[in-house]
Image: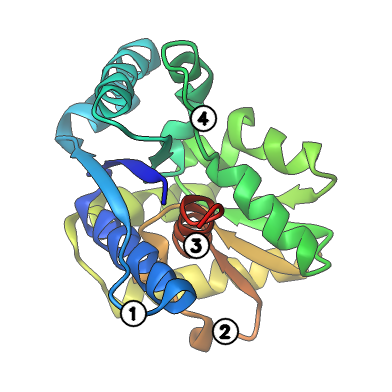
Amino acid sequence: MKTIGLIGGMSWESTVSYYQLINETIKEELGGLHSAKILLYSVDFAEIEHYQASGNWDKSAQVLSEIAQKLEQAGADFIVICTNTMHKVVPQIEEKISIPILHIAQATAETLLEKGIQKVGLLGTKYTMTQDFYKEKLLEAGLKVVIPDQSGVEEVNRIIYNELCLGNILEGSKQIYLAVIDDLKNAGAEAVILGCTEIGLLVKQEDTNMPLFDTTAIHAQKSAELAFDDV
């Protein structure tokens, strides 16, 4: 079994979900006492968020590249970054390591195409929703992407940073998200990507009849499958 190098802590709440989902997938597939081989480096998210807010992506790329190098040196066979937003700096990280990074947007695009989805709504941080680094992976796969209007972008982003990353799950915020999801449906989306690893803590499939694709669950499952691919 391959060893997974997890870069977590962005936030730690969603990293817990990664650890659990990866091990559950390994157990389901291999049975017995099998569990995942995992190396986890968990960052101080306050530091990373500061670089995000100040637009200092080069510094965040440097920090995550050094972590990826440490995981490679420790024996990781591939890297999994447990967040959507920081995939913005994947190209810089890839230059510093010789092992692959399992890209969350590519993993999600594969799953959407398997389900026959052609047009999808995207929720996430404002960086994920409005910048090209994430959407371009979906577009390259042949998907059409719609995002909320400006007020929707701001509200979705605010709830992520001010509530979900702090572990605060509020019913009022769930209703805001469900209203935004309805707007995306009205804009022609056939499904919605929960493109922030915390959103799945707030909104569940049972809350809406709109198909939801939780990137945390998708990324974790693909990570586990890659780990036991040769077993």
Residue closest to the eye, 161 or 97: 97
- In this rendering, which labeled residue sits more in front, label 3 or label 1? 1
Residue closest to the eye, 93 or 192: 93
Question: Which residue occupies 55% across, 39% down?
Answer: 103
CA separation in Å, label 2 and label 4: 36 Å
User: Dot 3 corresponds to which residue?
Assistant: 221
CA separation in Å, label 1 and label 2: 36 Å
Question: Which residue occupies 84% across, 59% down?
Answer: 118
- Decide which of tag 1 and tag 2 comes sooner along the chain: 1
- In the image: residue 188, left or right of residue 210: right
Question: Which residue occupies 44% across, 78% down?
Answer: 28
Q: Secondary structure at mark 4?
A: loop
Residue 52: quadrant of the picture: top left
- In this rendering, which labeled residue sits more in front, label 3 or label 2? 3
User: Dot 2 corresponds to which residue?
Assistant: 208
| Circle 2 crowding by C-alpha within 10 Å: few under 14, some 14–19, many from 20 | few
- Decide which of tag 1 and tag 4 comes sooner along the chain: 1
CA separation in Å, label 3 and label 2: 23 Å
Q: Of the residues shown, which amino acid type is indicated by label 3?
A: Gln
| Circle 1 crowding by C-alpha within 10 Å: few under 14, some 14–19, many from 20 | few
- In this rendering, which labeled residue sits more in front, label 1 or label 4? 1
Q: Horizontal and vertical percent for residue 205?
A: 53, 81
Q: Horizontal and vertical percent for residue 211?
A: 65, 76
User: Dot 1 corresponds to which residue?
Assistant: 32
In the picture shown, does residue 93 fall above or below 192? above
